[in-house]
Amino acid sequence: MDTLHTRLLRLYDNAQQATVDEFAQSMLPELRAVVGFDSAAIYSLTLLPDKSIRFNACLSEADARDKLEYRVRELRDGHMEAGGRVRSRDRLIERGFNQPGRSFFLDTRSVGDRELLEYTRRFKTEHAFLHATRMGREVGVLSLWRSRRPDAFQLADAARGDVLIPHLFKALQINRKITDLGEKAGNGSAWQIVCDEQGGILFSDEGANTLLGQEWAQWSLPRLPTPFLHDLMRQGHYQGRCLRATVQSSARLFVIRLQAVAAGQQLTPAELIVARLAARDLSYKEVARELGTSPATVRNQLHSVYGKLNISGKAALSHALRAA
């Protein structure tokens, strides 16, 4: 049987060698062997200047994502006071967020709030476990749940969590930093997102979130914008006004690499539509017929596109749209 020391060594070894998606896949199984659970989520939160709390991203197992999304959408039960202390109807959240670096657990039958109690019943949650770590305005959180009444978390679980979980967050930071440095060394100012098949974001760089927010003003985490996901899954790349992106799949996860489009090189919506049609090797007349415009207008728009993308003609257009 692996000792806790062996698991920690393996955790840091994986952090330095594995890709982001490979490392993400290894984290929860390592944790399960130390602190058992029926469902689990590792996610991040941002403490905003208006004292609200924003849910960012989530790596989950079983129905954990559904639990968290429902809670964020329906309950909205947490906020930050002026002094930085988090207040919530949920005693577990208050204890975990205000005493970072420690593990806490709760029997959900002791919850006095009617809405919270209904939430625990909805998702058949008998016992909850939480460990938070503060990183400036960012809070990394690990939540575990058990569904059977006899399987309560114990002090021994919290003690093991106090040892392992801080290392888990630290290893995650190391893994992302190594990956980030490697990507930026090869691609300039590039950022990365890891998502599942439904577009649920598991991990994302802040720069990637900023770009998506610029491209879609109404977008918010934790899922990718629908048109962005659709193009990526259908054609493997996306070219927008503010960003370019490519995607690779591995173990049912998708690694998306994004790069900002310089202000002077941003395609207008009309140019982008024309460029995508022309990249399918349609003639000026065919593109014009598709859009209900004239071939001369299409030609002028494409010449503008070529200049912004620094290419000389249609032969390079498909590659330019795919480049990140």
Image (cartoon, rainbow, N blue to C red):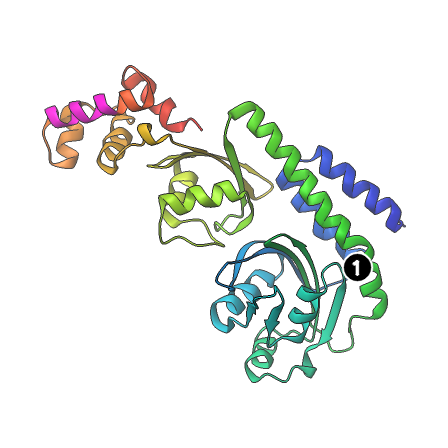
Q: Which residues are magenta?
A: 295-304
Q: Is residue 35 left or right of residue 141?
A: right
At 87% from the left and 51% from the top, the residue drawn is 4
Secondary structure character of the magenta stretch overall: helix
Tell me the residue that label 1 is attached to.
161
Q: Is residue 154 above or below residue 2?
A: below
Considering depth in this image, is 161 or 266 the residue closer to the camera? 266
- As helix, strand or loop, the secondary structure at mark 1 comes to helix
Q: Residue 46 at what x, y percent from top left? A: 55, 56
**Residue 299 lies within the magenta run:** yes
**Residue 215 lies within the magenta run:** no
At 36% from the left and 43% from the top, the residue drawn is 215
Q: Which residue appears farthest toward the front when viewing the image?
A: 83
Q: Quadrant of residue 113?
A: bottom right
Q: Is residue 162 left or right of residue 1?
A: left
Q: Label 1 is placed on what type of residue?
A: Gly
**Which of the image's four quarters has the C terminus?**
top left
Considering depth in this image, is 98 or 310 the residue closer to the camera? 98
Count of number-bearing discs: 1
Q: Residue 135 at what x, y percent from top left? A: 65, 51
Q: Is residue 75 above or below residue 109?
A: above
Q: Which residue appears farthest toward the top when viewing the image?
A: 312
Q: Residue 22 at what x, y percent from top left? A: 66, 40
Give neighbour class at mark 1: few <14, some 14-19, many 20+ (Cα, 10 Å). Answer: many
At 19% from the left and 23% from the top, the residue drawn is 283
